[in-house]
Image (tube, rainbow, N blue to C red):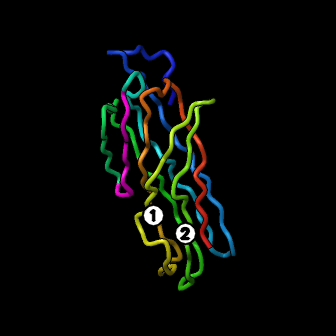
């Protein structure tokens, strides 16, 4: 999503946010596949508007502070673990990470999965899960497309 060409209204800056998630697998035959990137959606922040945007692992979105939603497109990150039925797995997620637009940054905190971090590959050989988090929007964020990688490992 690009925010180029969008007119500013009421002194707000429109932030287009898309978070790319990276995945890796350790100790085959267990692997993890990214099915969907984090997407906090477009929000009006900056120009004195600060707050948070939270996407739950279940897929709902809430706001705090003076950050305003623009549009309805948003999603948690979604992954699928595949492996040998009955094999144990452990998911590792970052506690927080930074997203960037050039020299501008925001932090994503409270990174939370929809399933426990440890489990067993069920019948069928696959388990899917979502990841939610909280985007911390500063009062001076500029209008840009912010992105980063969130490392997710499964072993």
Q: Nearer the viewer, residue 132 or 2?
A: 132
Residue extending farthest to the bottom is 86
Q: Nearer the viewer, residue 34 or 142?
A: 142
Residue identified by numbered label 2: 91
Residue extending farthest to the right is 27
First of labels 2, 1 by sequence position:
2
Q: Where residue 113 sits in the image (x, y, percent)?
A: 44, 63
Local secondary structure at mark 1:
strand
C-beta proximity under 8 Å, tags 2 and 1: yes
Q: In the image, is residue 141 above or below residue 10?
A: below
Q: Which mark is residue 47?
A: none
Tally of numbered tags? 2
Neighbourhood count class around disc 2 (C-alpha, 10 Å): few under 14, some 14–19, many 20 upward: some
Kindly report which numbered mark, 2 or 1, lies closer to the viewer in this rendering: 2
Real-space Cα separation, disc 2 to disc 1, in angstroms = 10 Å
- Specify whether 118 is left or right of 68: right
Give me the residue at 45% from left, 29% from top: 15
Q: Where residue 149 sits in the image (x, y, percent)?
A: 60, 48
* Quadrant in the rendering for residue 43: top left
* Quadrant in the rendering for residue 99: top right
Local secondary structure at mark 2:
strand
Give me the residue at 41% from left, 37% from top: 41
Q: Where residue 78 sits in the image (x, y, percent)?
A: 48, 56
In the image, the segment drawn in magenta is 49-58
Q: In the image, is residue 81 above or below residue 123?
A: above
Q: Quadrant of the C terminus?
A: bottom right
Neighbourhood count class around disc 1 (C-alpha, 10 Å): few under 14, some 14–19, many 20 upward: some
Residue identified by numbered label 1: 129
Q: Nearer the viewer, residue 29 or 4?
A: 4
Give me the residue at 53% from left, 85% from top: 86
């Amino acid at each position: 999503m690009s925010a180029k060409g969008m007119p500013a209204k009421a002194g707000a800056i429109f932030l287009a946010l898309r978070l790319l998630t990276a995945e890796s697998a350790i100790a085959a035959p267990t692997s993890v596949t990214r099915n969907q990137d984090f997407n906090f959606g477009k929000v009006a922040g900056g120009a004195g508007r600060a707050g948070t945007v939270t996407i739950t692992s279940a897929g709902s979105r809430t706001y705090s502070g003076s950050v305003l939603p623009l549009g309805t497109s948003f999603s948690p990150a979604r992954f699928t673990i595949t492996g040998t039925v009955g094999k144990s797995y452990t998911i590792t997620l970052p506690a927080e990470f930074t997203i960037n637009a050039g020299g501008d940054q925001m932090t994503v905190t409270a990174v939370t999965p929809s399933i426990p971090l440890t489990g067993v590959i069920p019948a069928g050989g696959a388990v899917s899960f979502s990841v939610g988090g909280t985007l911390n929007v500063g009062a001076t964020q500029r209008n840009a497309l912010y992105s980063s990688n969130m490392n997710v490992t499964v072993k």
